[in-house]
Image (spheres, rainbow, N blue to C red):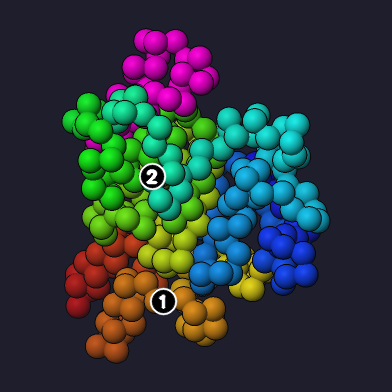
């Protein structure tokens, strides 16, 4: 079952300007993790805004869970898609962290007891429960981003859409949030779409859509993308650290089977050590 489908979608912000997206088609299946990656200006963030109805295409159709995205369905669509922006300031409405996470639940008329449970659970998931009584604007950038994510998780969306959402986190914070996404995918069958220019963030995705000059340039797995240096060079993408380290180890006579994350790298190094 497809949760997200773009059918021949084209978009530009102003008439007589170049198309930001040009005849884009793709499908994201239920419980799939997909990364949209590309250089700044490639059109990937525009895809995210179209997906949730913040923009409307000039051509083509967009479907979420079989419903076409238009003015009549937009509020129902948005109840299923949780969007976390690059700048968390855009999502703060409450005077305290607790109030901010509660805002979306109040709009959905969630009963008080259930609301309390969801708020505490979502804050615990992102490691921010101890900050529940703090004012959001007094927090650091990374803490603000965690609160914005907790607010989205509390409403239990079927689709989690992240637009450069980990850009304000340090590497440890990014890894902990990515672990949470994988847990949600396993436990709640949540479809996960992340928009990024950072190749490190796509290592755990099921699929990667490379966006280049408003088109889907590649639709492949992370392993297929990172095994082809010429593709990374062509689209101006940086080599992930693990891939770069693997290449250097190969030059030293240590041949590994293209590990895609730290666990795979350590497991293969241990196996290599035992066989030496």
Residue 180 quadrant: top left
Q: Compare residues 27 and 274 and report the one nearer the observer.
A: 27
For the C terminus, the image quarter is bottom left
What is the number of the mark on residue 214?
none
Main SS class of the magenta portion in the image: helix
Whether residue 267 is visible to the viewer of this picture, yes or no, is no
Q: How many marks?
A: 2
Q: Which residue is mark 2?
A: 89
Mark 2 surroundings within 10 Å by alpha-carbon count, few (fewer than 14), some (14 through 19), many (20 or more) = some
- Mark nearer the N terminus (2 vs 1): 2
Judge depth for marks 2 and 1 and give the one in front: 2
Left/right of residue 140 with respect to residue 91 in the rendered view? left
Which residue is found at the position 75% from the left and 57% from the top? 9
Q: Nearer the viewer, residue 70 or 123?
A: 70
Q: Is residue 218 highlighted in magenta?
A: no
In what element is the residue under mark 1? Answer: loop
Q: Residue 66: horizontal and vertical position, in percent?
A: 73, 37
Residue 185 visible in rendering: yes
Q: Which residues are magenta?
A: 101-128
Neighbour tally class for label 1: few under 14, some 14-19, many 20 plus, Cα within 10 Å: some
Specify the label residue 238 is tagged with: 1
Residue 249, position in %: x, y?
A: 27, 82
* Residue 23 x, y percent position in the rendering: 76, 64
As drawn, 123 above or below 148: above
Quarter of the figure with residue 145: top left
Q: Secondary structure at mark 2?
A: helix
The location of residue 237, given as percent across then percent down, is 46, 76
Residue appearing at x 49%, y 79% in the figure: 236
Whole-angstrom CA distance, mark 2 to mark 1, is 28 Å
Q: Residue at the location (34% across, 82% down)?
A: 247
């Amino acid at each position: 079952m497809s949760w997200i489908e773009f059918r021949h979608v084209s978009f530009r912000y102003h008439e007589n300007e170049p198309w930001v997206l040009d005849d884009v088609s793709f499908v994201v299946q239920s419980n799939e993790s997909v990364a949209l990656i590309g250089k700044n200006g490639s059109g990937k963030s525009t895809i995210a805004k179209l997906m949730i109805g913040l923009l409307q295409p000039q051509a083509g159709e967009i479907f979420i869970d079989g419903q076409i995205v238009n003015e009549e369905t937009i509020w129902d669509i948005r109840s299923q898609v949780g969007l976390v922006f690059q700048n968390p300031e855009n999502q703060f409405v409450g005077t305290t962290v607790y109030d901010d996470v509660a805002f979306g639940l109040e709009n959905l008329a969630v009963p008080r007891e259930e609301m309390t449970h969801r708020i505490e659970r979502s804050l615990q998931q992102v490691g921010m429960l101890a900050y529940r009584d703090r004012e959001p604007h007094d927090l650091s950038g990374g803490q603000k981003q965690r609160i914005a994510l907790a607010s989205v998780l509390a409403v239990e969306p079927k689709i989690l859409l992240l637009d450069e959402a980990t850009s304000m986190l340090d590497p440890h914070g990014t890894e902990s949030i990515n672990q949470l996404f994988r847990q949600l995918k396993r436990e709640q069958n949540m479809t996960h779409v992340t928009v990024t220019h950072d190749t490190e963030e796509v290592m755990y995705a099921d699929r990667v859509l490379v966006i280049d000059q408003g088109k889907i340039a590649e639709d492949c797995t992370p392993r297929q993308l990172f095994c082809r240096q010429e593709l990374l060079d062509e689209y101006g993408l940086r080599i992930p650290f693990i891939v770069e380290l693997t290449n250097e180890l190969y030059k030293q006579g240590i041949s590994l089977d293209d590990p895609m994350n730290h666990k795979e790298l350590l497991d293969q190094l241990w196996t290599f050590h035992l066989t030496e």
